[in-house]
Image (tube, rainbow, N blue to C red):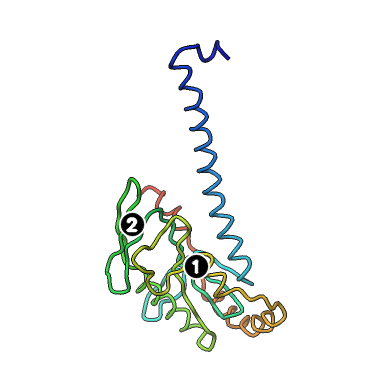
Amino acid sequence: MTEIFPDTSLGVYLLPLILVLILLVFWLVYRRRGHARSFEGVIKSIAFERISNLIIPNADEGEIQIDHLLLTAAGLLIIDLKEVDGTVFGSDKMQDWTVIGANHRFTFANPQPALYDRIAAVRQIVRQVPVAGRILFLDGARFTKGVPGLVCDLDELLAEFGDHDGAAAKVKVDAFRPHWGLIMAKAQVAAPKRDRRRTPAA
């Protein structure tokens, strides 16, 4: 050990620093994987069917993209997933929301109007089936000034849309399946948003 870290003041401080850095890297990897597993776990527990990155006709004109559409015992659920790390400042009436983190600050458009458009587009197709939408922020986001409408975290999503009565849930879902088929007939699958951002312009 003395050959790698000589018995100097530098060697005394270098080994603990390297160990701390290694632990930090492992913690960050574990945290990111934990978020993914938590999201997938909650989705699997509330959804009987799921399609992601779909494009359907807009209620007015053109097309509209949906991050995740779930078939649940409560009807169809649209999820707009937001992966941000920091404190989020937003409200129902604000045009832009702001995220402030330890080393970053950025704004993005209030996601509620776009979600309302997505709900309207799905309702235009299924009509008689309940359609809900939620803006899902993962654990890295914190709202300190109140949580805007339609915004939730994983625990709230599970509490609202989880159905612990399996037999009753199956009956409800079976009634919704023909309408789910209507969505599938209209839907196209788009490239994931993250992949599209990484593709260089032609």
Q: Residues within 10 Å of mark 1 (few under 14, many from 20)?
A: many
Residue 20 shows in the view? yes
Does 37 sit left or right of 151 as displayed? right
Res 72 label: none
Residue 56, image x, y percentages: 47, 73
Residue 202 shows in the view? no
| In the foreground, 143 or 66 | 143
Res 99 label: 2
Q: Residue at x 41, y 71 (%)?
A: 64
Amino acid at circle 2: Val
Q: Residues within 10 Å of mark 2 (few under 14, many from 20)?
A: some
Q: Residue at x 38, y 47 (%)?
A: 200
Q: Which residue is mark 1?
A: 54
| In the foreground, 59 or 106 | 106
Residue 164, image x, y percentages: 67, 75
| In the foreground, 174 or 200 | 174
Q: Residue at x 27, y 70 (%)?
A: 94
* 3D distance between C-alphas at marks 2 and 1: 27 Å
